[in-house]
Amino acid sequence: MNLLKKISHYMATSKIGWKVGIKYRFNFFITTLTTPLNIIIFYFLWKAIFDYTGIEIIKGFTFNAMIQYYVLSMIVGFFIWAETDKWIAQDVRRGHIVSMFIVPVRFMWQHLAFEAGINFLGVILNLIPVFLIGFLFFGLNIAPVFYFTSFLVSVVLAFLLAFFLSFNLGLTAFWMKRITGLRRVKRALGLFLGGGMIPLTFFPESVQKILHFLPFEYTRYVPINIYLGNYSVSYVFLQLGLQVAWILALYLLSVFVYKRAFRQFAGAGV
Amino acid sequence: MRDVINVKDLKKTYKTHLRKEGFFSAVKSLIKREYKLKHALQGISFNIKEGEIVGFIGPNGAGKSTTIKALSGVLFPTSGIINTLGFVPWKDRIDYVKNIGVVFGQKPQLHWDLPPLDTYALNKVVYDIPENEYKKKLNYMIKLLEVEEIVRTPVRDLSLGERMKCKLISSLLHNPRLVFLDEPSIGLDVIAKDKMRDFILDINKKQKTTFIITTHDMSDIERLCKRIIIINHGLIVYDGPIEKIKKEYLNHKHLDIKFNKWNQKFVLKGCKVIFKDEYELKLELDTKKQTIKKVISFLISTFDVADIIVQDPPIEEIIQKIYKEKIK
């Protein structure tokens, strides 16, 4: 009962995030409109590469699979969009963060609920059109039930992972005030090392091995490959397990850092 | 009545970066930082009883906000004891803040992109306010502050004063036993200030809510608080009834009179001319020797008066007088 009550507290916050999202629905429409444009760029780029080299399969991808890869990358992108670092840094810098501490809610869960609310709207508005565009124009296959469900589980986990990465980064603002540079680094790393620019199979073997030990590929590359059916059933479960492990690790880290961040804030009165 | 707040020997020292002007000192500060200690609170003690409305007055940087922050649990004191409603504010933060309402005059507390009503609905869930009680209370407050339209408008489109009213509602919806208002009169016009005052008095009477209100302007809380605590340089200068301060230190008023034209001849008992020219006269009036009513009626009947402004002396002046008295 108590837990249910607590969940309802945070659901109410998600609703606020959702409402804020609705206020900026125009923004979402623009995102939806520019998404096919991005895919078109990759489409012609890879078409040129495949035609020029005349090779059927490059680094494990056929031309068709490659295009599907980018369509799916866009879709996963909607799920893992987390800007908590921005919100926290903004509040700290403007001295508004104190307002977060005079309400009886946990700082971390409050942010997670808000972000989930905004994202849920983004996903709903964008998912269906992008999937449709993928199916109709870019030869996106409908994944078998097992892979499709695993994909859905995996993107939700990817969102949580992206959130905790963002939240941990945001907490550093309590000391650094301005974290614009760090946020850029995170975004670039997340996109590049997560497989948003090119599939990770293009990296040297050794680099790929190192990437297994970093959180980035679990936010993007893993769910995409699950959808594409590139993993065996047992490997899918292993990857989902690794996602959960990363979420737990980053959650524990953020509990640790948050305690110190609050101490820093309440000690110095930012 | 029992105490809701006990504060004993509260001290707070901030460590701030010291940086000189100029580019090179900025570079230098990247490598070696110099710190300066700022003693915001130097040991203050007071008790507040349930149902009191206490004014916390002091000039800028006196330590008012620091005290409010420590009391609301968002600031760790350097030393000293605080007990509010049986809690130590900065421990058990979540359990404690359920029982209090806080308005920071200069901080946003409502969701910027949404109408205040959305924030209220969130509060309803977060504070577990029963539906019918929530509706009753909200309607009552909306009517009292006359904000029917305002609570439906996105916060970013509201004026400073309108936002303040909405924040006040948000801080009171959950029936807190203790309310901190930090500079609540920012952005309010005279009529709004009056309304806010009646509103606070009404809530205080009906629910026995304890209020602590900070301000640097005495006139804001003159008719609201029976007791005031004057604070300066992190020390309590005065803690007692406001009446005593009024009688002993607010015994003169400043008058600023504008004329369409006048002969610059003015003599009246208890009035000291500070400044005069062709169109203006500034007076300091000793209210023990002369009533304000007499002065104004004399002015109006004798001269062609365009405007009269009556003001209390600023808080700094009162503090100086208290110090002088203490030395004596």
Image: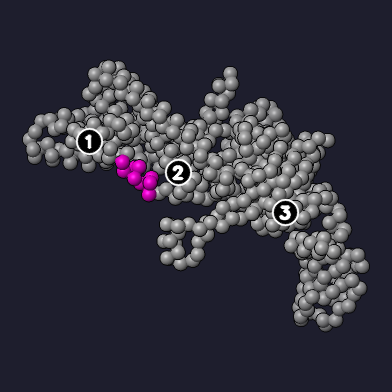
Residue with the mark numbered 2 = A172
Where does the image place residue A142, in percent across and percent down from the top left? 26, 22
Local crowd size for mark 1, using a 10 Å CA cut-off: few (<14), some (14–19), many (≥20): few
Residue with the mark numbered 3 = B235
Residue A207: give its label: 1
In the rendered view of the protein, which quadrant contains the C terminus of chain B? Answer: bottom right
Q: Which residues are magenta?
A: A181-189
Residue depth check, mark 3 versus mark 1: number of the one nearer the observer:
3
- Between A70 and B9, the residue placed more toward the observer is B9
Q: Earlier in the sequence, mark 1 or mark 2?
A: 2
Where does the image place residue B198, in percent across and percent down from the top left? 78, 46
- Between A258 and A99, the residue placed more toward the observer is A258
In the rendered view of the protein, which quadrant contains the N terminus of chain B? Answer: top right
Q: Name which residue lies at 54% across and 40% down.
A: A262
Report the chain holding disc 3: B
**Res B279 quadrant in image:** bottom right
Local crowd size for mark 2, using a 10 Å CA cut-off: few (<14), some (14–19), many (≥20): many
Local crowd size for mark 3, using a 10 Å CA cut-off: few (<14), some (14–19), many (≥20): some
- Between B188 and A3, the residue placed more toward the observer is A3
Helix, strand, or loop for circle 3?
A: strand
- Label 1, label 2: how far apart the Cα atoms are: 28 Å
Where does the image place residue A246, in percent across and percent down from the top left? 37, 29
